[in-house]
Amino acid sequence: MKRILVTGGAGFLGSHLCERLVEEGNDVICMDNYFTGSKKNIYNLIGKPTFERVRHDVTDPFKVECDEIYNLACPASPPHYQYNAIKTVKTSVMGAINCLGAAKRTRAKVFQASTSEVYGDPEIHPQPESYWGNVNPIGIRSCYDEGKRVAETLFMDYHRQNDVDIRIVRIFNTYGPRMNPEDGRVVSNFIVQALRGEDITIYGDGTQTRSFCYVDDLIEGFIRLMNQSATVGPMNIGNPGEFTMLELAEKVLQKVRGKSKLTFLPLPGDDPKQRQPDITLAKEHLDWEPKVGLDEGLDRTIDYFRSVV
Ligand code: NAD
Ligand code: UDP
């Protein structure tokens, strides 16, 4: 039995990961400060003998004896990470240092949840891991993008300098049950608005694209990356199916059979125009590719939101 620490374990992705790791017979410690996460996400795990909760902020040092660490602590939706931009930088940078320090002390393997945002507003399409990105260092998204880029730097430096066993995943937009309905990300916003009969808020003209990965596919990719040793990453995990926000809105409205109208709002600063993962490396090293298409994934996610909205 492995003892595994998951930071951000009460969040959307963290709760799915904790569930999967407990199911596989591991002893799981979920660390969270509940900024964007919720105990509701882990209700089904609380009380299990192999699941333990710790309320702790990753920016504060901690000591833990464990075999593996998955570092997911960080607000992920633009309104939440921009709410306290300085805290977001601290969470990424100091959180990475604290996790790497713990991994160095205990010789644990440590996994960083990085992001497609390291590519910024990409000039290469689709984005391979070898692309260095096009990131504004001083804009409103920089606290998140640059924080995650420094975290990747720290992971690689601890690996080269101190021989810490690391893995880095670059996550592309992921959706599914347990997204916070008020979180502000596009999939949850559109579904909640359609279910409530409110206007669907399209930022800009809606022609910008994203590639949406269903949460179960992503978690499978995490586990496969962690459990192989051919590469430490960084590795893209995402679904290459690419859609405009107008296409996404139409799909959601059709599925919910909603009568909402589209309303066009200003595009937030530095909003990337396009994004699609090149998943050649994941196919090659992990024998991984996504199995759940957008239609099926949206059906499952809409079912979830019907039960909570
Ligand atoms: P989320 O906001 O639901 O989860 C983040 C969790 O981290 C929450 O439970 C939150 O309370 C916790 N947290 C935040 N700051 C903390 C701190 N200082 N100390 C302890 N806990 C803290 O978001 P998510 O979608 O589950 O994202 C999880 C990770 O994956 C994040 O690191 C995010 O950057 C990364 N990621 C997610 C996506 C996506 O599409 N979901 C895409 C790219 C990267
Ligand atoms: N978006 C939108 N309406 C919303 C929320 C988001 O049109 O109500 C757009 C946003 O401008 C971006 C895309 O949807 O172009 C994805 O936004 P999200 O916040 O989900 O993720 P990110 O921009 O970080 O990829």
Image (spheres, rainbow, N blue to C red):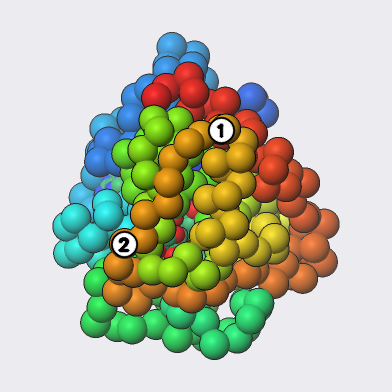
Q: Where 305 sits versus 123, above or below?
A: above
Count of number-bearing discs = 2
Residue 11, quarter of the rendered image: top left
Could you tell whether 255 is left or right of 296 in the image?
left
Q: Residue at x 60, y 86 (%)?
A: 124
Labels 1 and 2: the sequence-earlier one: 1
**Percent from the top left, x then y, of residue 185?**
40, 50
Q: Is residue 95 above or below residue 291?
A: below
Task: Specify whether 50 is left or right of 83.
Answer: right
Q: Which residue is mark 1?
A: 256
Residue underneath mark 2: 265
| Quadrant (top left/top right/bottom left/bottom right) for the C terminus | top left
Instruction: Report the amino acid beneath label 1.
Output: Val
Secondary structure beneath dot 1 equals helix
> Dividing the picture into quarters, in which one does residue 134 lie?
bottom left
Residue 149, x across and y down, in percent: 41, 74
Q: Is residue 128 left or right of residue 291?
A: left
User: Residue 78, how many percent across, how many down?
Assistant: 32, 58
Percent from the top left, x then y, of residue 20?
61, 32
- Identify the residue at image location x=25%, y=41%: 35
Structural crowding at the residue carrying mark 1, measured as other residues with C-alpha within 10 Å and reported as few (<14), some (14–19) or many (≥20): some
* Residue type (three-letter) at the residue carrying disc 2: Leu
Q: Give the Cα distance between marks 1 and 2.
A: 22 Å
The quadrant where residue 279 appears: bottom right
Q: Which mark is residue 211?
A: none
